[in-house]
Amino acid sequence: MQRDAVMENTSPQYIPRLPVEEGDPATDGRMFRRCLGQYGTGIAIITTEADGRRGAVTVNSFASVSLEPPLVLWSIADTSRSRELFTSSGRFAVNVLSAKQMDVSRHFSSKLDDKFADAVWALGEFGSPLLDGCLAHFECETYSQVDGGDHTIIIGLVKRASRFDGEPLLFSQGQYSIADSHPAASPTPEASGAKPDTTAEGTIVSQIFEAHHLLSTRFDEHRRAEGLHLSIARILACMYDRPGLKIDQLAAATHLGQRDTEDAISELLERELLIGTEGGYSLTDAGRNLRVAIKARWLAFQHAQIAGIPEADLRATIRTLSKLIDQNKMAE
Ligand SMILES: Cc1cc2nc3c(=O)[nH]c(=O)nc-3n(C[C@H](O)[C@H](O)[C@H](O)COP(=O)(O)O)c2cc1C
């Protein structure tokens, strides 16, 4: 399209923003996946059983389709070892993961031979395994299958849906996350006419969430200034402290998904920040220098953030945060 034509079809307030990256997915698959990662999803384990064989895969392609009839869909890669079982069994269950099940997600996205050996599960009434501790189960009959390029889209007719208490596990921008209500979506005490709660008890937890969100967004600017995004920065930090790790160990240590770890590693190799050896991966001198630079930015960032806050206040904050972390770790 010509530039003049673009301007004609643009509202007067429109100010063009430069994308961080853009291009043709056919020639830049990693860019495409990072763009897709901007769309946050939940995580589910899809399970099936037929003729004494069981299959399970971690997916974030699950989506609702129709209410009448009740249909859901997900897609399975041609490379998945359990593809044949899923496309022939005629049934499956969707196990929606809770925020406490990040390890379950990792377990079922691995290449273990028997993923059920260490799992807690029971066969559901409609013939597919149901995992313990999930937020929801959808027990399905396969309704149809559609060719989806290098995936097969599997549509299921939901025979039974069950919901349990808990918070969802989410996946966005290549990393696991948990949900927090948007501050603008929570009804303010002012709006309801109630007096705002300014006590420590009434504000501390929401203040922690807000501080975390603001600080991590602000530090992102520093990462970008060094040409890094979050997954690359995590891999760099991990490789700096523990050279020689293999992909699986890196994915576990950085809490990134397998695919994002692989993408980050390919990018680091291309940028000659990393080299692969028989014993695993190690940073090059340039990689180590970059890690040192980002760490220096982090220290300066911390220093600037806490400047002027009395030492006693900082110590009290650390005590409170440590207590909250400890008691919630114990509750897991
Ligand atoms: C967050 C996340 C989402 C995934 N989503 C999908 C998906 O939608 N479809 C798929 O085929 N594989 C997906 N995978 C990869 C599979 O989980 C993984 O390749 C699979 O479990 C390997 O199983 P296999 O034993 O059948 O080969 C995802 C992995 C992760 C970590």
Image (tube, rainbow, N blue to C red):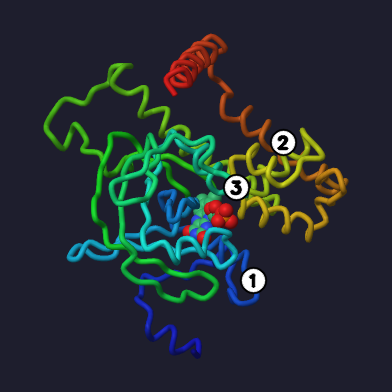
Q: Is residue 37 visible?
A: no
Q: Which label's residue is closer to the chain start, 3 or 2?
A: 3
Question: Can you say whether 296 is above or below 31 in the image?
Answer: above
Q: CA distance from mark 3 to mark 2?
A: 31 Å
Secondary structure under tag 3 reads loop
Q: Which label's residue is closer to the chain start, 2 or 1?
A: 1
Under mark 1, the amino acid is Asp
Secondary structure under tag 1 reads loop
Instruction: Tell me, yes or no, whether the two marked residues, 3 and 1, touch with CB atoms within 8 Å.
Output: no
Q: Residues within 10 Å of mark 1 (few under 14, many from 20)?
A: few
Question: Can you say whether 87 is above or below 299 in the image?
Answer: below
Residue 148 in percent (x, y) is at: 47, 74
Label 2 lies in ligand 1 vicinity (Cβ under 8 Å)? no
Under mark 3, the amino acid is Ser
Residue 140 in percent (x, y) is at: 31, 57
Q: What residue is shown with label 1? A: 28
Q: Nearer the viewer, residue 183 or 36?
A: 36
Tag nearer the camera, 2 or 1: 1
Extreme residue toward the top, this view: 312
Q: Nearer the viewer, residue 61 or 303?
A: 61
Q: CA distance from mark 2 to mark 1?
A: 30 Å
Residue 199 lies in quadrant: top left
The label on residue 295 is 2
Q: Which label's residue is closer to the chain start, 3 or 1?
A: 1
Residue 20 in percent (x, y) is at: 58, 62
Tag nearer the camera, 3 or 1: 3
Label 3 lies in ligand 1 vicinity (Cβ under 8 Å)? yes
Q: What residue is shown with label 3? A: 110
Which residue is found at the position 75% from the left and 54% from the top? 268
Question: Can you say whether 306 is above or below 75 in the image?
Answer: above
